[in-house]
Image (spheres, helix red, strand yellow):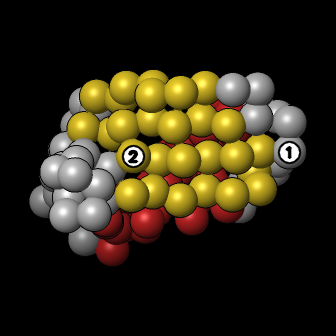
Amino acid sequence: MYYIIKHIMELRVLSKESSELMIEIKGENHTFMNVLKGALLETEGVTAATYDLNPIQSGGQIDPILSLKTDGRDPLEALGDATKSIEKAYGEFLKAYQAAVK
């Protein structure tokens, strides 16, 4: 038996420039943010990716803020590609898991 949990995320664009993006991702934690940051850093055109999730230092901010910089590539496009790579990895893991529990 296995379970698939669907989760809808709320994103809020805080700022967007031609090669920079800052978005707030409501309700997420270090677990997801580290996966996303790692995927972004492996994405073509991304020069920097980090997030802030420190309520004490950020004046009470409780939802993570992702900061992304590119070499001129549209940062939303780069974020989309990183998301697709996470989805692909998850799909491969799910297939392996399903085969293992048969």
Relative height, residue 92 to residue 24 (above, below): below
Q: Residues within 10 Å of mark 2 (few under 14, many from 20)?
A: many
Residue at 54 percent of width and 47 percent of height: 67
Q: Is residue 20 left or right of residue 7?
A: right
How far from the left and from the top, in percent, is residue 66?
Answer: 47, 47
Q: Which of the numbered marks, if any, corresponds to residue 39?
A: none
How far from the left and from the top, in percent, is residue 71?
Answer: 86, 45
Relative height, residue 66 to residue 10 (above, below): below
Q: Give the quarter of the figure containing the N terminus.
A: bottom left
Residue in front for this viewpoint, 5 or 51: 51
Q: CA distance from mark 2 to mark 1?
A: 20 Å
Q: Give the quarter of the figure containing the C terminus.
A: bottom left
Q: Amino acid at mark 1?
A: Asp
Q: Of the residues under marks 2 and 1, which one precedes in the sequence? A: 2
> At numbered mark 2, what does the secondary structure look like: helix, strand or loop?
strand
> At numbered mark 1, what does the secondary structure look like: helix, strand or loop?
loop
Q: Residues within 10 Å of mark 1 (few under 14, many from 20)?
A: some
Residue at 29 percent of width and 55 percent of height: 58
| Residue at numbered disc 1 | 71
| Residue at numbered disc 2 | 65
Q: Amino acid at mark 2?
A: Ile
How far from the left and from the top, in percent, is residue 40?
Answer: 63, 54
Q: Is residue 8 left or right of residue 34?
A: left
How far from the left and from the top, in percent, is residue 24?
Answer: 36, 37
Residue 97 in sight from this viewpoint = yes
Residue 77 in sight from this viewpoint = no
- Indicate the quadrant where residue 90 lies: bottom left
- Indicate the quadrant where residue 70 lies: top right
Q: Are marks 2 and 1 in contact (CB under 8 Å)?
A: no
Q: Is residue 77 left or right of residue 5?
A: right
